[in-house]
Image (cartoon, rainbow, N blue to C red):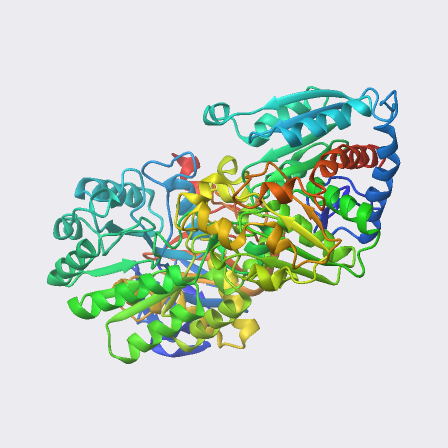
Amino acid sequence: MKIHIRGGRLIDPKNGIDRVQDVYIAAGKIAAIGEPPKGYTANRTIDATHLVVCPGLVDLAARLREPGFEYMATLESEMDAAIAGGVTSLACPPDTDPPLDEPGLVEMLKFRAKTLNRARVYPIGALTQGLQGARLTEMAELHDSGCVAFSQADAPLTDHQVLFLAMQYASTFGFSVWLRPQDPALARDGVAHDGQVATRLGLPPIPVCAETVALSIILLLARETGVRLHLCRISSAQGLDMIRRAKADGLPVTCDIAIHHAHLSEMDIGYFDPNCRVMPPFRSERDREALRRALADGTVDAVCSDHTPVDEDAKQLPFSEAEPGVTGLELLLPLSLKWASEEGVPLSTALSRITFDAARVLDIDAGHLSPGCAADVCIFDPAAYWKVTQAALKSQGKNTPYLGYEVPGRVTHTIIDGQIVYEASAQRSAIAAQRESC
Amino acid sequence: MWLDPSNPQLNRNGELHHLLSLEGLPASILWQILDTAKSFAGVTEREVKKVPLLRGKAVFNLFFEPSTRTRTTFEIAAKRLSADVINLAINISSQTKGETVLDTVANLAAMQADMFVVRHGASGAPYLIAKHVAPEIHVINAGDGRHAHPTQGLLDMFTIRHYKHDFSGLRVAIIGDILHSRVARSHINALTTLGCPEIRVIAPKTLLPSNAESLGVHVYHDMRQGLKDVDVVMALRLQNERMQGALLASAQEFFKYYGLTEEKLELAKPDAIVLHPGPMNRGVEIDSSVADGRQSVIMPQVTFGIAIRMAVMSILAGN
């Protein structure tokens, strides 16, 4: 299949390209940019006039809910959501049931994902067996079966010696360790930022020090062990300051935030909106502003969806009992565009945070459109607004505070390995056609 | 949508449809409830203590958390308004059977309920219920987690008004476990709305929310300073389970520094009144000599509670 993407605004942050230029795809790879290769005849031409052509999105955290939580979502539904959102590569955290702590589970997930022939799935292996925080997993084996990093997801790791040893062991092999800093004792029973809103509504609080205390321990141990460290879902201005200093000291550390944290604060909880029950909690306006700035200045390396589909039964509960998380794969691009336009950040910077910068954190060859690399492409209309409704979301999880809102950026085509896997304009995706033919 | 989206307690005409919290209610509605309660206070002293305002209506007392006093006063209030009252104590076991709050409520609504009186251990649960019931059903919050206990707040306002007549010159001190207290939050909301110029909270830092000042109160850690020249003293119940963890060292130490004794009460104005939402821990947050003393209005509070609940139910039924 040879695809000629014609007349689009090509934005490829890695290669410093932001201009109207054609893209030529052949044999699953980017064949050429600008001028067609010799003797090139396209099977398909996509008219991308007024559209943006960029690398397929790379999402650092998307819960696909398999295995174990199929009633919340299935691999199939969430992979549909991914490609509808322009996401071509995604990392999934190990907090499945059972957790991704055995090579067999990882291989099964990779295999299931591959047969669906949609987004590329990069599993993050469990750092400890069963995420119990006591015994290390077979990291080297897990790596061989496809894990790209190791994490505790949201499970607590209270034993500092285990954490220390896990970092040492991971660094032996050069693996990267991903941690979301939260001291479990300081966050005990908490459901909302320890601020004005929790005080008013009487919600059990999670203080900022739950993040910073954990951060200081993690950063000290990382310094000690020299492990490659990625810090997930930073929520506070103080946390960012600590990371900024660690980076200035030359520590091999990266970090991400979830895109909804760049937009929402504790105020959005309103009258106990369970869709605003997230982990870490939405913090103060001041924290939110700091996150937005840090995403622009690069202190925050990448932004992810932290996609967590939750079924309605688990959300329609009193705020503190509702399961945390928001659905996000289909909102990663729109909310990143919204952030960029509100902050006056160049489009190429915004796209970099969800493509090349994210790929760099994952240490995978993706998120750019250099000739010769796999043709993973996202084409979207930056001027088109669409309304977030339950019906519009392909994810099985409809849990987002953005229901009813209009957001910018409609994905028109998603291409993976040179195959069009999603096409909005044709009313039905190629996948749907493929499914019908089965 | 028949409710005001910016305040889910009010209908489009700005009238009370549910009573979920005292926060965000206009003073006019609070005065309406207090005035109506005053007219009912007479009823409770009559030979025939019934009025037919809620005849034919079904009031469901839906208690997800145990309560004796509040449930009983709601029941008496509903019966005096001639309503049919159904008491349901939903214990944890039926919840662990998998039925969610909303399932329970949907089932009961199907039994032709007109009003739900809800107590729940989680802050905000009555909002969830109010959001999902049919438009003709009213929800009254009878205490949700740490969030609000609006009828308790109102009956305490009624009590203060009864003895002090006016809020505009009052200095009020609330003592004890502010952090976990839904009663304190409702007090603060009501006092602020009714024009009380100075609200103080007195507690150790472990029993205060981190942003207490943002509620519009002055924070004191020392009883001797906090009680000085106040007109109204509101002691809060200290739950026994708070004594187990690291919030406090011991009940004895709490009593020594934050217990309301005659000696400390002398710092308040000579005509200061003492309130307590009950049930009291004598010798922990309040000394018996104060609880039973001349400045105590704790028993009248309970009586006024019936009138307040009658007022709330009749106003809701009328809107």
Judged left or right of residue A354, residue A388 is right
Residue B295 is at least partly visible in this image = yes
Q: Observer-nearest residue: B132 or B21?
A: B21
In the rendered image, the quadrant that contains the N terminus of chain A is bottom left
Q: Is residue A242 above or below residue B124?
A: below
Residue at left offset 59%, top offset 51%? A201
In terms of depth relative to the viewer, which is nearer, B30 or A278?
B30
- Quarter of the image where one finds residue B50: top right
Look at 33% across and 43% down and name the residue there.
A116
Residue A51 seen by the camera: no
* Count of numbered circles on the image: 0
Q: Residue A377: name its quadrant.
A: bottom left
In front here: B309 or B56?
B309
Residue A48 coordinates in the image, percent (x, y): 50, 65
Q: Quadrant of the C terminus of chain A?
A: top left
Q: Is residue A323 above or below residue B23?
A: above
Task: Quadrant for residue B51, please give it.
Answer: top right
Q: Who's the residue at 52% across and 38% down the image?
A: A312
Task: Tell me residue B185's x, y (percent).
Answer: 63, 51
Q: Looking at this rendering, what residue extends furthest in the left direction?
A: A172
Above-or-below relation of B116 to A307: above
| Residue A123, position as x, y percentages in the image | 27, 50
The location of residue B145, given as percent across then percent down, is 56, 42
Q: With A40 as the anchor, is A291 left or right in this view?
A: right
> Is residue A180 left or right of B296 when viewed as pictured?
left
